[in-house]
Image (cartoon, rainbow, N blue to C red):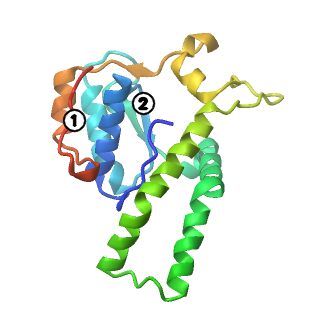
Amino acid sequence: MIWLEAYHTSSNPHLIAGYFMKAVLNEAGCPRRVRADRGTENGIVKDLQTFLRRNHQDSLADQRSFVYGKSIANQRIEAWWSILRKECVQFWINTFSDLKENDQFSGDFLDKNLIQFCFMTLIQGELNDVAHTWDCHPLQRHRNMVEPSGKPIIMYTSTELYNADNKLVLVDALEVEVCIQQCVFKDGQHSLPVVL
């Protein structure tokens, strides 16, 4: 799991770009290709990805390094969303729905901020736990399946064990600094230290 973040918005394209660039820094590279839906929150990620990949020479360089596609066509991500909802999110959906139904939440500015203040850290902790559990669980081998089996974290970090290509592409630190200027980060951060 590259990132799973709780915050007061998921639609600000500069914030989503911040998550993306933080991952680029943490992984010391960008993905060979990004697939995302056509939501407005992904527009800056598209620009950053194609900027970082514009000078590469492989078959997925430049504009081919980003592709739009509906998530409903991706069974893996749809299955993951179902697991996340069952393991973590449904509890919070029910809790906040109950508060609203019992007239304990009006939805005004103060109520929203109080809910975020009281619960955001708890929710982020649970998201971190779910992501860790997912990364460390064994993927079962199924009959007639060509994908390898193993633990996602090992499959991601040790691609050579699975005769797979590493899909990470090295990026230039100065280009990363340029990209970071287009981002907003959680908790008021306006930049990140660039060390690749």
Position of 48 compared to 8: left or right?
A: left
| Lower position in the chain sequence, tag 1 or tag 2 | 2
In the displayed structure, does residue 124 sit left or right of residue 17? right
**Does the rendering let one see residue 70?**
no
Helix, strand or loop at label 2? It is loop
Q: Position of residue 38 (x, y in %)?
A: 40, 52
Along the line of sight, which residue is nearer the eye, 26 or 50?
Answer: 26
| Residue 157 appears in the picture as rendered | yes
Disc 1 marks which amino acid?
Leu
Q: Is residue 139 above or below residue 108?
A: above
The residue indicated by pointer 1 is 192
- The residue that label 2 is drawn on is 33
Left-right relation of 12 to 121: left
Front-most of residues 39 and 196: 196
Q: Residues within 10 Å of mark 2 (few under 14, many from 20)?
A: some
Callout 1: 10 Å neighbours few (<14), some, many (20+)? some
Q: At 33% from the left edge and 71% from the top edge, which residue is drawn?
A: 113
Compared to residue 167, the image places residue 71 above or below, namely below
Residue shown at 55%/65% (left/top)? 92
User: Any mark on residue 139, and which?
Assistant: none
Residue at left offset 70%, top offset 30%: 138
Task: Name the image quarter holding residue 136.
Answer: top right
Q: Position of residue 120 (x, y in %)?
A: 41, 59
Q: CA distance from mark 1 to mark 2?
A: 23 Å
